[in-house]
Image (cartoon, helix red, strand yellow):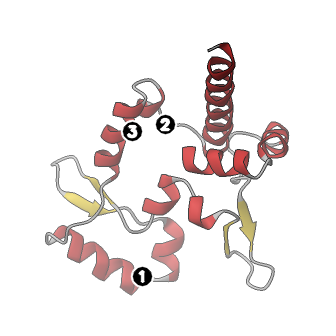
Amino acid sequence: MLPLAEELFRRNEAADWLARLAEVGDTDSCVFYQPDPLIPGNGRCRFYSRRPSLCRLFGSASVKDKNGKAILAACVCQKKAFPSIVESAGKAVSEGLVSLNFTDFSIQFSGIDPYLGTRLLPINRAARIALEKYGLEMQMADSQHFSN
């Protein structure tokens, strides 16, 4: 989420997005989701190149089952829309195809921020926290620059 926060500050749009985030609930659809006007039910991230890690991983990454074996993390929509593809991808992962793993990424995130990196947050709350945290870091860096 931090690359997206950085991009929004670079564009001078962070305050606008923080205002939008204040208007929606934490568990509402992601504020960055843009519905497809031509195909109902489809859509994309407004900031695709800076989309959050969760969005990058979902549908192509794996999770570990209770026995520690990797299984494809496909959502209900993917299973419904593309059942044969999800089935063959799931089989490939269970047979050893190397895939990105949510647990591995969670461990890396906890190394960056032990508090936030171990918490599961709704997408809009995570976006708000990332924008606030990045903004605070920028303010602190600026104040240190001027105090020297």
Of 48 and 125, the residue lying toward us: 48
Of 112 and 59, the residue lying toward us: 112
Q: Nearer the viewer, mark 1 or mark 3?
A: 3
Q: Quadrant of the C terminus?
A: top right
Q: Is residue 28 visible?
A: no
Which residue in the protein does label 2 denote? 120
- C-alpha separation, residue under disc 2 versus residue under disc 1: 28 Å
- Tell me: 61 left or right of 30: left
**Which image quadrant is residue 118 in?**
top left
Q: Disc 1 residue type? A: Pro
Are dots 1 and 3 in contact, CB under 8 Å?
Answer: no
* Spot occupied by residue 75 in the image (x, y as percentages of width and height): 47, 65
Residue 36 image label: none
Is 27 above or below relative to 82? above
Q: Disc 3 residue type? A: Phe
Secondary structure under tag 3 reads: helix
Which residue in the protein does label 1 denote? 83
- Tell me: 102 left or right of 9: left
Residue sitting at x 74%, y 53%: 31
Residue sitting at x 41%, y 66%: 74
Which residue in the protein does label 3 denote? 109
Q: Residues within 10 Å of mark 3 (few under 14, many from 20)?
A: some
Secondary structure under tag 1 reads: helix
- Tell me: 49 left or right of 147: left
Residue sitting at x 25%, y 52%: 64
Tag 2 or tag 3, which sits nearer the N-term? 3
- C-alpha separation, residue under disc 1 versus residue under disc 3: 31 Å
Q: Disc 2 residue type? A: Leu
